């Protein structure tokens, strides 16, 4: 079986460094908010190209903490509208709602599967205060047009970079393109921990200080609480492991690009649609999505022939029971994507032979089979 993502094999590539990181933490006797955390935050800020990294418990918390900090700083208020891609994972929308804000779901571009700048423009109202873009599947969703729309309308631009560690827009990395960015280090991400983890990157020192306090029970000084905060911290073990794996991220992303290029060159079946290619550097292929109206048939066919695939995501946020306020929305592009999307294996430990086998299977597949 060609696994969709063989995490055991990926982490074995760095087993010596991971083992050393774990031993170092155990020996230190410091397991929360210690030197490993400080070191990772510094390394990751340098990697992304921002003045600050504030680590936290997970990617959902990272988005929430950004929004909550802006509320505490008076730049957002409960009831304000935040524009969000409709075809994102529900965590993005959850964070907006949990912060007491109103998510305004907008359609993606049908060719890139990324949020449409024109749909953003059309969705702005007098209550809109922020735009939250998602670098979905590992592809850069940022554009100069989106930045100009935000500047013209005095809107905050926030990035959900959970799936795009190391991605670029020109010389800059995603995570440094807006006012602030949220990152997830869930084990399956391009930069994955061996547990949960997250971070916020920003150049705004006041925002970073506020987020750091909110993530630590609302405390900026021991036993002094400025806010009603939460406990959302990256533990020392995960910080040490992430520091070890970060130095290999660009190389592993490059391998993902090589695999994606084989798919783009090789897949010719007219029943399977591939998103348009992003400009060079603007996709690190956390996922490789394809679209077909016979998605379930293709998935079963590939599984029968030894290839594991996943669906991202079978039900869009606005059709979830948890979001009754959005269920009346008509979002045909989003619904088509969620009904048609199938993610092919794109793990950096795949061999060219395995990737070519997937290509051959897809080209030999007929929906009527």
Image (tube, grey):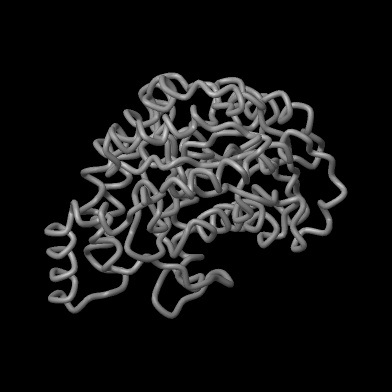
- On the picture, is 18 further left or further right than 44? left
Residue furthest to the front in view is 369
Residue 41: x %, y % from top left:
31, 53
Residue sitting at x 39%, y 77%: 222
Q: Is residue 227 visible?
A: yes
Residue sitting at x 26%, y 68%: 237
Residue 331 lies in quadrant:
top right
Q: Nearer the viewer, residue 34 or 190?
A: 190
Residue sitting at x 39%, y 20%: 280
In which quadrant of the rendered image does the C terminus lie? top right
Residue 175 lies in quadrant:
top left
**Residue 84, relative to residue 29: is it above or below?**
above
Q: Is residue 203 visible?
A: no
Q: Nearer the viewer, residue 44 or 348?
A: 348
Residue 294: x %, y % from top left:
66, 38
Residue furthest to the right in view is 328
Residue 109 lies in quadrant:
top right
Marker count (numbered) = 0
- On the picture, is 16 further left or further right than 213? left
**Residue 306, relative to residue 263: is it above or below?**
below
Q: Nearer the viewer, residue 352 or 13?
A: 352
Residue 215: x %, y % from top left:
47, 66
Residue 209: x %, y % from top left:
44, 56
- On the picture, is 75 further left or further right than 80? left
Q: Nearer the viewer, residue 209 or 279?
A: 279
């Amino acid at each position: 079986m060609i696994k969709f993502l063989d995490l055991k094999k990926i982490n074995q590539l760095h087993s010596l460094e991971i083992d050393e990181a774990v031993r170092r933490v155990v020996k230190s006797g410091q397991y929360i908010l210690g030197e490993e955390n400080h070191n990772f935050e510094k390394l990751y800020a340098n990697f992304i190209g921002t003045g600050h990294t504030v680590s936290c418990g997970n990617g959902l918390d990272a988005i929430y903490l950004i929004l909550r900090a802006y509320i505490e700083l008076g730049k957002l208020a409960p009831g304000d509208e935040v524009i969000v891609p409709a075809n994102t994972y529900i965590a993005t929308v959850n964070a907006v709602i949990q912060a007491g804000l109103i998510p305004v779901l907008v359609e993606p571009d049908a060719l890139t599967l990324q949020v449409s700048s024109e749909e953003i423009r059309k969705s702005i109202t007098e209550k809109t205060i922020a735009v939250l873009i998602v670098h979905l599947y590992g592809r850069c969703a940022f554009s100069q047009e989106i930045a100009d729309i935000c500047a013209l309308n005095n809107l905050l631009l926030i990035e959900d970079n959970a799936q795009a560690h190391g991605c670029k827009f020109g010389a800059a990395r995603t995570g440094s393109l807006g006012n602030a960015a949220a990152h997830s280090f869930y084990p399956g991400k391009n930069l994955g921990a061996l547990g949960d983890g997250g971070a916020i990157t920003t150049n705004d020192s006041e925002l970073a200080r506020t987020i750091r306090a909110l993530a630590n029970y609302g405390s900026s000084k021991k036993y002094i609480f400025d806010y009603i905060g939460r406990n959302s911290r990256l533990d020392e073990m995960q910080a040490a492991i992430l520091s070890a794996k970060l130095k290999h991220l660009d190389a592993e992303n490059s391998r993902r690009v090589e695999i994606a290029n084989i798919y783009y060159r090789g897949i010719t079946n007219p029943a399977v649609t591939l998103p348009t290619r992003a400009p060079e550097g603007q996709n690190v292929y956390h996922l490789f999505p394809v679209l077909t109206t016979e998605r379930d048939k293709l998935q079963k066919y590939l599984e029968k022939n030894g290839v594991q695939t996943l669906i991202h995501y079978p039900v869009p946020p606005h059709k979830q029971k948890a979001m009754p306020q959005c269920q009346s929305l008509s979002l045909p592009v989003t619904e088509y994507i969620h009904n048609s999307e199938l993610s092919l294996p794109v793990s950096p430990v795949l061999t060219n032979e395995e990737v070519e086998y997937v290509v051959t299977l897809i080209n030999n597949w007929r929906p009527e089979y």
